[in-house]
Image (cartoon, helix red, strand yellow):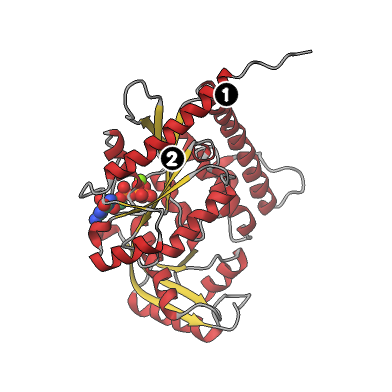
Amino acid sequence: MIDPKDRETAVVVGVITKNVTIKKAKTHLDELARLADTAGAEVIEYIIQKRDRFNSTSLLGSGKLLEVAEYVKTHDVDLVIFDEDLTGSQVKKIESIVPCKVIDRSGLILDIFARNAQTAESKRQVEVAQLEYILPRLTRAWTHLCRQVGGIGTRGPGETQLEVDRRLIRKRITELKKRLKKSASIKQRQHDRRHTSFHAALVGYTNVGKSSLMNLLTHSQIKTEDRLFVTLDATTRKLNLGLHSNAVLSDTVGFIRKLPHKLIESFKSTLGVVSESSIILHIIDIHEQDFADQMEVTAKVLSELDTSDIPRITIFNKIDLIERERLAMMKSKFPDALFISVHKKHGIETLNKRIEKFYSNHVKKHISASAKPATKGW
Ligand SMILES: Nc1nc2c(ncn2[C@@H]2O[C@H](COP(=O)(O)OP(=O)(O)OP(=O)(O)O)[C@@H](O)[C@H]2O)c(=O)[nH]1
Ligand SMILES: [Mg+2]
């Protein structure tokens, strides 16, 4: 937890073009403010500009940028956070007018991941994503990276500081990827050995209650909190589905709108538990007004993970937080979904039954596959 007196003061900025309403933009900035809070900054103002198109040099129009600069000066702001991704030259341009640090949504998400990474593997995954994020944004303003990574004598003949920095970053990325590949192939071998076991994976937007449900179903004590990206590493535990069952359940990292693509790329080995699962449990927070967009974000990431033939159960959690009428409406809108409350333990029995049904189908499939006569080799 960050000491309140060390918290930075921040302003969040959204630029919206034609098809986005102000209400939607505010919801996006609410989420950005929650991300900022997780990273240790207190957001004191939202600034939104509606434009026909983004300004390529500074994203915002020049008048609006001066307005932001004025606000930063009068309110002693430490940090301006943009909801859109910024290029290196846009950051430079904005920082030449606004007298404080400027970051974008991806940079903020990467910062949170870096703070929350616990295991050596997730630390490496985040570092790769951070370096790949920095690489195209390196400008001459970036100085003396080799002091940190390389040291004296690392500069090749005729190389500028910028070239040295780029080369060192690329080298570090290659090293980290090599190590990650090694741990991924160990995981793959472990998975091959137990591929007939039934593997369920909890998946969904961040903060929907995946770890809370994991704890309830497997009697575990994984950390849960009303914050974004509390879980970064996949945890797998035995799922009790009766005698002799070899079913397991995995909790995974949550997703978010505009999750930096590099982050998904580098978390692919952690997310391997999803692409290799027998069933995906897609958890949604029914209480979030933006839940439909959040479902879409999850569906999109799942399609990137090549999971189209894995069966899914759609599970709406936190029904204790909504009105009866709304629950009835949602049930008629999503007739195949399950509706639960982890806190009140509602709907858990039905969920267990649904999982058991998939489990017995899985067992039947594997028994009949192993009973088939082996094909002759000649
Ligand atoms: N009211 C209510 N709150 C819930 C319920 N289930 C979980 N929560 C709360 O929602 C918050 C997030 O829960 P987590 O289990 O940490 O969510 P997560 O999906 O694992 O989140 P990340 O790991 O950060 O992506 C916590 O404060 C939980 O106590 C529920 O059924 N009802
Ligand atoms: Mg979690």
Q: Position of residue 82 (x, y in %)?
A: 48, 69
Disc 1 crowd rating (10 Å Cα; few below 14, some 14-19, many 20+) is: few
Distance Cα–Cα, label 2 vs label 1 = 23 Å
Along the viewing direction, whichever of 192 and 122 lies nearer the viewer? 192
Disc 2 crowd rating (10 Å Cα; few below 14, some 14-19, many 20+) is: many
Residue furthest bottom in the image: 63
The amino acid type of the residue labelled 1 equals Ala
Q: Which residue is mark 2?
A: 201
**Compared to 252, does 54 lie above or below?**
below
Q: Could you tell me which secondary element the residue under label 2 belongs to?
A: strand
**Compared to 28, does 125 lie above or below?**
above
Q: Position of residue 123 (x, y in %)?
A: 47, 39
Residue plotted at (47% across, 74% down): 14
Q: Position of residue 374 (x, y in %)?
A: 66, 16
Q: Is residue 230 visible?
A: no
Along the viewing direction, whichever of 186 and 35 lies nearer the viewer? 186
Q: Could you tell me which secondary element the residue under label 1 belongs to?
A: helix
Q: Which residue is mark 1?
A: 369
